[in-house]
Amino acid sequence: MKVLIVGGGGREHAIAWACAKSSQVEKIWCAPGNAGIASVAECVPIRPMEFDRLVSFAKEHAVDLTIVGMDDPLVGGIVDRFEAEGLRVFGPRKNAAILEGSKAFSKDLMKKYGIPTADYTTVHSPEEAFAVLEKAHFPIVLKADGLALGKGVLICQNREEAEAGVREIMEEKRFGSSGDQMVMEEFLTGREISVLSFVDGRTIRLMASAMDHKRAGDGDTGLNTGGMGNFSPSPFYTEEIDAYCREHIYQKTVDAMAAEGRPFKGVIFFGLILTPDGPKVLEYNARFGDPEAQVVIPRMENDIIDVINACIDGTLDRVELKFRPDACLCVVLASDGYPVKYETGFPITGLETFEGRDDEFVFHAGTKFNEKGEIVTAGGRVLAVTALAPTLKEARSKAYEATERIHFANKYMRHDIGHAIDEA
Ligand code: AMP
Ligand code: GLY
């Protein structure tokens, strides 16, 4: 089987790595890929939103299956486009990817179907927003409606901050047109957990829980990022919480989408928060998380191609997902200054120390080859150093030891990924 993967970050590296392990796969391309993905796939210089070029490539090379890793092309309708061309593709159609693409849509869906989430109001103008603030409790959370690289969420402590936030999102359009509508939401407190799942339109199969570290600095300080590290499973995701979410959240979401005429096929990422009133949904994503994929996929024992095929064919009820009991933890190595301003182009050394290992991996996020053929930094998040071990604590020590084998100028990482493990 010939596979094309759309994307070029750490998540797509983990997906490509899993595809390369499948005995069914003879060839992998990745568009655009990166220098690490190039070790398991042939990278092609086509950007994820260039649907025409991707379709032509898939046809010309007789691609059997295209796997879309990223949110932008999914929300933009890449799956509908591939299907219209008779091409086999994994991911939700545009009318289902809206689960991630519009926060107003997902909040209304949860309200209509009784799925626990924070109370909210959707507004369409700054005037409406200011009127809501007259009667609001603080802190309040403001969310630009559409995709904003995970940055369109502002937590405002008081009315002044909230008014400034409304202006930023709805008047200055800091997050572009995704600020045309805005969700104003009750502030919740509790631990956050990510749960990934495969869905075939009707059946949902849960992967494993994970815990992200979104802030740039140690002690959960600094700006929000795409994620600075992660581990799986979360010791706070107990059987009791799992049972509650199975009853009130997971299948209900899948059924709600089907009832709305938007059957969801692909990966649903449930961003949960464990509040004193029980688990609630903070957000949905319509794809694997990044870096959640880097800690969940290495634990999966199934052939990823079998699972993806079952999602596309609607036969997921016949699949049982199997995960190794080993824990997995990843530490993101970033360019100093991320997520604001940083330099790139620095050579990376030590990558070869991971070759041939099946308990330590380095998934590439922002890397490329320079003209001398060296692997250099090419983004804010550069690498995800990942370790598998019998316990979370061991995985953490191993991952941190492994980070010391990698060198590049301006290397930055958090030193407390997995700190919550000590409180479990
Ligand atoms: P989202 O993109 O919706 O996941 O939001 C990004 C981050 O903002 C989440 O991971 C939370 O840390 C925080 N957040 C979002 N919504 C809320 C809320 N209602 N209460 C507290 N924190 C929130
Ligand atoms: N790590 C969070 C996300 O992928 O959205």
Image (cartoon, rainbow, N blue to C red):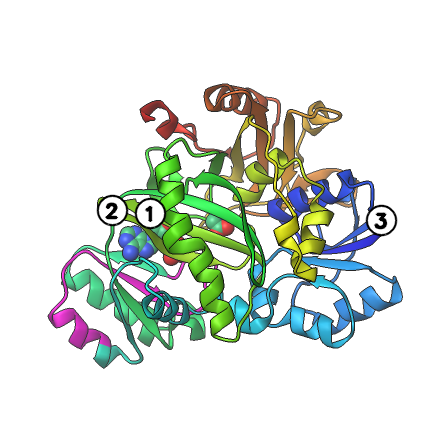
Mark 1 vs 2, N-terminal side: 2
Residue tagged by mark 2?
189
Q: Which mark is residue 273?
A: 1
**SS type, badge 2:** loop
Give x and y (percent) for residue 33: 71, 51
Type of amino acid under label 2: Thr
Q: Please, which residue is most extreme toward the left here?
A: 135
Left/right placement of residue 112 relative to residue 11 reads left
Give x and y (percent) for residue 158: 15, 58
* Location of residue 362 by image quarter: top right
Depth check, mark 1 against mark 3: the one in front is 1
Residue tagged by mark 3?
27
* Location of residue 122 by image quarter: bottom left
Please provide the residue range marked out in magenta: 129-152
- Residue 141 lies within the magenta run: yes
- The answer as to whether callout 1 falls within 8 Å of ligand 1 is yes
Mark 3 vs 2, N-terminal side: 3
- The answer as to whether callout 3 falls within 8 Å of ligand 2 is no
- The answer as to whether callout 2 falls within 8 Å of ligand 1 is yes
Query: Quick check: marks 3 and 2 in contact, CB under 8 Å?
Result: no
Number of labels in the image equals: 3
Give x and y (percent) for residue 242: 40, 42
Distance, label 1 to label 2, CA atoms, is 7 Å
Type of amino acid under label 3: Lys
